[in-house]
Image (cartoon, rainbow, N blue to C red):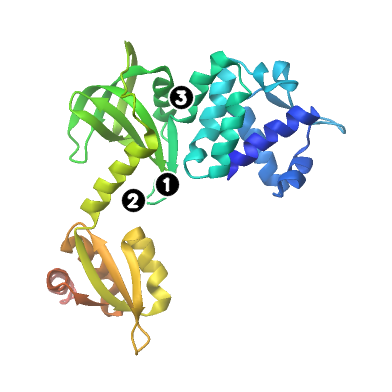
Amino acid sequence: MRADRLVAALLLMQARGRVTAAELADELEVSVATARRDLEALSAAGIPIYPQPGRRGGWSLVGGARTDLSGLSATEAQALFLLVGPAAAVSGEAKAAMRKLVRALPQTFRADAEAAASATMIDPTRWGERDRRRPELVDLLQAAVVRRQKVRLTYTNSARERTERLVDPWGLVDKDDVWYLLAGTERGQRTFRVDRIIEAEPTDQPAERPDDFTLASAWQEVVGEVEQRRSRTWATVLLEPGFVPVLRDQFGQHCHTDGELDDGRARVRLAAPTPLDIARHLAGWGAMIEVVEPRSVQVELARIGAELAARYASGH
């Protein structure tokens, strides 16, 4: 995991004073390009490491952090934990490294550093189409989570209805490059897609958060609710085994191989919210896929086929 490497790079620089990208790559068993990107990421995030040009150059920690990581300032410590904290949710090694790093910080910094580490998490499982651009508002919302400040949002929902809300930001989740904000509202916990937030303005009002709140647990509940909605209709289809990866790319985790028939075709189970959603995905496959069940998906495919035939059969 990248978080492990970033922490290891810091500890290596603390021990040696200076390290080159080639030396770091050899220590961590990665390419020199990967090591250089990690070092640049640490520097860009505000961690006090800088390159030194020349024949005997390299990268080193500066200031008090050179001899002791407790020499990090409060801002630098937060920057570090915002950068490496999210991976702790998916890597036991990263979580252990974070615990050790927290103990290396001054007592007065630990609460803010831990808040920064838990402000964001990563969920690599895809929901639908991906947008790999990091929304500009993520940094602002992360800061509000760490500082426990209420935020005033201007938000558009899936129906493009615009509303204004005052929320208590509790945490951010990066789900395969789509960002979500979990927040408290007057109606309880809500989840907001960050790319649908038009404006976000931190306020001077302190945000409230349940004492027993953990971002990982809260997000798991959200995932459970969404997955239940997304898998209301199941269909069984048959196709050549070589095309199963393409089908899996369309349906994500709602695509399960269910054995192979005597004629060599793969039997696959698919799920989506409605029969029409499944039919829309399968219509472009034509006769390459046979839908065994349910009848409702077959009916939707027949209707789509009839509409296309009526429009294009005459050549007009």
Foreground pick, 173 / 138: 173
Q: Can you tell which quarter of the image residue 274 is in? A: bottom left
The picture places residue 17, in percent across and down from the top left corner, at: 79, 27
Cβ–Cβ below 8 Å for labels 2 and 1?
A: yes
Write down the residue under mark 3.
Answer: 115
Q: Is residue 280 left or right of residue 118?
A: left
Q: Can you tell which quarter of the image residue 25 is in? A: top right
Task: Using a 10 Å C-alpha cutoff, classify the residue at mark 1 as few (fewer than 14 neighbours), some (14 to 19) or many (20 or more).
Answer: some
Q: Which of the labelled discs sits on residue 176, or is there none? A: 1
Give how far apart the Cα atoms at labels 2 and 1 are. Answer: 8 Å
Q: In this view, does 241 lie to the left or right of 46?
A: left
Foreground pick, 83 / 282: 83
Q: State the quadrant of the C terminus.
A: bottom left
Give how far apart the Cα atoms at labels 3 and 1 are. Answer: 22 Å
Q: Which residue lies furthest to the top in this view?
A: 204
Q: Is residue 95 left or right of residue 30?
A: left
Write down the residue under mark 2.
Answer: 127
Say above or below: 63 vs 101.
above
For marks 3 and 1, the one nearer the N-term is: 3
